[in-house]
Image (cartoon, rainbow, N blue to C red):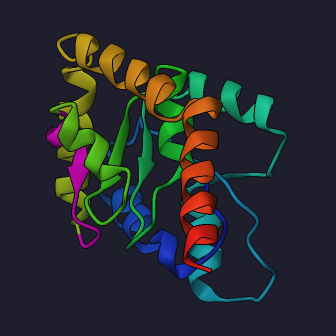
Amino acid sequence: MVARWDSIKNFSAVMRLAEAMPKHWNIHCITTIPETGSEFAKTFKEKITVEAPRPIKQIYQFYKKMDIVIFPSHFETFGGVVAESMAVGTPVVVSENTGASELFKKYKLTDHLIAPSVSGKDFVAKIKRVIDSREKNQKKYDAFRAGLKKDFSPEKIFQAYRRLFVSYSKKR
């Protein structure tokens, strides 16, 4: 998981996962936990390997080392973490309440979606299914990455902004 320390990111789902996962699993999270002395933060650090934020190239290396990335946010407009992880070839289990979930629906990867209120047991089962189906889903992952390149290319984004600005300036 890569996220700022914020309740919207749903660290409680990560904690439920940590409490239910097999002993040989490890969760790594890139975040900064404020020194507030909260019991939740203390317990989180005991169960999960917390790593310091780093430059984007090192984050890409982090994604590549992971078997899977989780993105359980309560809500998110899109979620760059999802695109970054998928772009380097690491599957993501993503909250159905994020804009990125629309891409998973588009590329028929709905088995990667979770509800933010997912139980630890169901979260573990979902992760196992996604890992076990990784080879079967490879063509879908390839299509997803190609779609990211096409739909989010700098040229396409620039043209969308240009149309927006032209449209706005005509209204004035």
Residue 88: x percent and y percent? 55, 21
- Residue at figure coordinates x 35%, y 66% from the top left: 16
The image shows residue 6, relative to residue 73, as above or below, that is below
Q: Is residue 104 highlighted in magenta?
A: no
- Residue at figure coordinates x 24%, y 19% from the top left: 140
**Closer to the camera, 26 or 172?**
172
User: Is residue 27 visible in the rendered structure shown here?
Assistant: no
- Total marks placed: 0
**Closer to the camera, 163 or 79?**
163
- Residue at figure coordinates x 39%, y 60% from the top left: 72
Residue 146: x percent and y percent? 41, 18
Residue 103: x percent and y percent? 30, 41
Residue 121, by quadrant, is bottom left
**Closer to the camera, 113 or 156?**
156
The image shows residue 13, relative to residue 151, as above or below, that is below
Residue 138, by quadrant, is top left
Going by the image, does 157 lie left or right of 70? right
Give the magenta part as a residue range.
109-117
User: Is residue 101 visible in the rendered structure shown here?
Assistant: yes
- Residue at figure coordinates x 19%, y 42% from the top left: 105
The image shows residue 137, relative to residue 112, as above or below, that is above
Residue 118: x percent and y percent? 22, 65
Going by the image, does 30 lie left or right of 54? left
Give the quadrant of the C terminus: bottom right
**Closer to the camera, 142 or 127?**
142
